[in-house]
């Protein structure tokens, strides 16, 4: 029987309650909702409009192949924007105070080919609970060709991972939709966590949306566009390459950069820090001064704020980041941030290079 990881309760009555009180006061004093405001709903409308219009142009316009290929790239990027900006918030329950609306927008992830059910399980429940903990955080559980943390076994090929990772990241969405989802639906456990087996309804919804994806984004477009198969495949794959590298980089830059920790529980499966303080040591922001970065990443460049307040819509992260940063300073806690997305990418590159050379660290049994 696997033991559940326990966080140190020592700090539970200090840092996190204080920062929650301050953030709550910010919303109350400014008469703001923690969910989407008018600006956020306009953003939702714009992204969905781009997603739908780019798809309709592809299947109905009859444009030259080069124009179709460019539009495929735009559609791939818009698909990533849907995930980062809309479904991510909706699945966390932060997009709207209306649960039905959150459910509706959550299912957009299923339409784009992924699984809302698996994302809720792996991201909300597991990644947010056990950030950067080897053997428990599913985001660290990648193919053996990648070594993301010092507790994973090092192989000779990892010495080159800082180079070939840029060839693998674009394949993220294809792998996610056509391989990983199926494997994960059959998994019985994730680290210590043993979820309830998927019900018949969950399986039906899972396969139903997978079939819908194939119909909407492979069979129907190929039938309507009427171009040679090889040209269609180039367009389909390059759309996924854009989507894949966008998604991969946004999430990698938040937890796999220099200066972050990869704590392990002791022999009693206990961690030395409380949950909130653990987030401060394992999470990093990037490009916080850039409105464009914030817009495109769905606020996930404010990853610290997201981990502490996943139920707050990302449109509010720039404002509450000032509160989080000041409170962290008062408590003597780190507040990791890279000034730009480019500098974060450089830090990620150096982290991956180090992981390819650093000997494996022992894991307590």
Image (cartoon, rainbow, N blue to C red):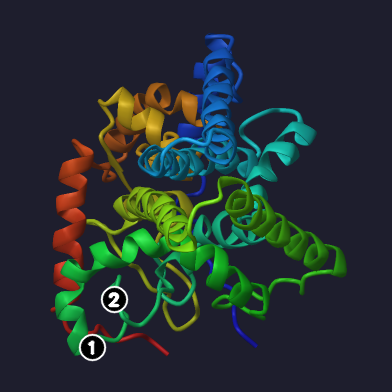
Q: Residue at x 56, y 38 (%)?
A: 55
Displayed quadrant of residue 19: top left
Pick out the residue farthest to the top: 30
Q: Position of residue 113 (x, y in %)?
A: 61, 55
The disc, 2 or 1, on the residue closer to the chain's N-terminal end is: 2
Relative to 350, residue 284 above or below: above
Q: Nearer the viewer, residue 267 or 229?
A: 229
Q: Residue at x 60, y 68 (%)?
A: 181
Residue 7 shows in this picture: no
Q: Which residue is mark 2?
A: 147
Q: Nearer the viewer, residue 279 or 105?
A: 105
Q: Which residue is mark 1?
A: 155
Circles 2 and 1, Cβ within 8 Å, touching? The answer is yes
Residue 84 shows in this picture: yes
Q: Residue at x 65, y 43 (%)?
A: 108
Q: Nearer the viewer, residue 196 or 266?
A: 196
């Amino acid at each position: 029987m696997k033991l559940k990881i326990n966080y140190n309760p020592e700090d539970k009555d200090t840092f996190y309650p204080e920062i929650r009180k301050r953030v709550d006061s910010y919303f109350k004093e400014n008469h703001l909702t923690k969910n989407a405001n008018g600006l956020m709903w306009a953003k939702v409308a714009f992204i969905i409009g781009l997603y739908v219009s780019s798809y309709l142009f592809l299947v109905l316009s009859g444009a030259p192949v080069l124009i179709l290929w460019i539009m495929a790239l735009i559609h791939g990027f818009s698909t990533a924007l849907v995930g980062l900006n809309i479904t991510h918030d909706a699945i966390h329950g932060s997009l709207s105070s209306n649960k039905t609306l959150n459910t509706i927008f959550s299912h957009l992830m299923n339409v784009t080919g992924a699984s809302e059910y698996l994302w809720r399980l792996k991201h909300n429940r597991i990644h947010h609970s056990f950030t950067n903990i080897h053997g428990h955080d599913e985001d660290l559980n990648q193919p053996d060709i990648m070594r993301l943390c010092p507790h994973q076994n090092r192989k000779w090929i990892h010495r080159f991972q800082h180079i070939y990772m840029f060839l693998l990241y674009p394949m993220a969405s294809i792998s996610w939709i056509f391989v990983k989802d199926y494997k994960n639906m059959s998994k019985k456990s994730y680290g210590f966590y043993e979820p309830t087996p998927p019900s018949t309804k969950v399986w039906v919804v899972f396969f139903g949306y997978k079939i819908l994806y194939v119909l909407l984004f492979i069979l129907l477009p190929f039938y309507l566009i009427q171009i040679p198969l090889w040209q269609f495949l180039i367009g389909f794959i390059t759309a996924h390459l854009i989507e894949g590298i966008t998604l991969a980089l946004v999430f990698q830059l938040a937890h796999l950069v220099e200066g972050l920790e990869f704590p392990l529980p002791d022999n009693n499966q206990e961690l030395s820090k409380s949950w909130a303080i653990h987030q401060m040591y394992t999470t990093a922001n990037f490009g916080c001064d850039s409105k464009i970065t914030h817009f495109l990443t769905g606020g996930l460049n404010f990853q610290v704020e997201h981990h502490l307040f996943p139920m707050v819509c990302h449109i509010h992260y720039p404002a509450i980041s000032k509160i989080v940063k000041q409170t962290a300073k008062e408590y003597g806690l780190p507040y990791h941030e890279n000034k730009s997305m480019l500098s974060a990418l450089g830090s990620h590159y150096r982290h991956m290079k180090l992981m390819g050379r650093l000997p494996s660290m022992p894991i307590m049994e």
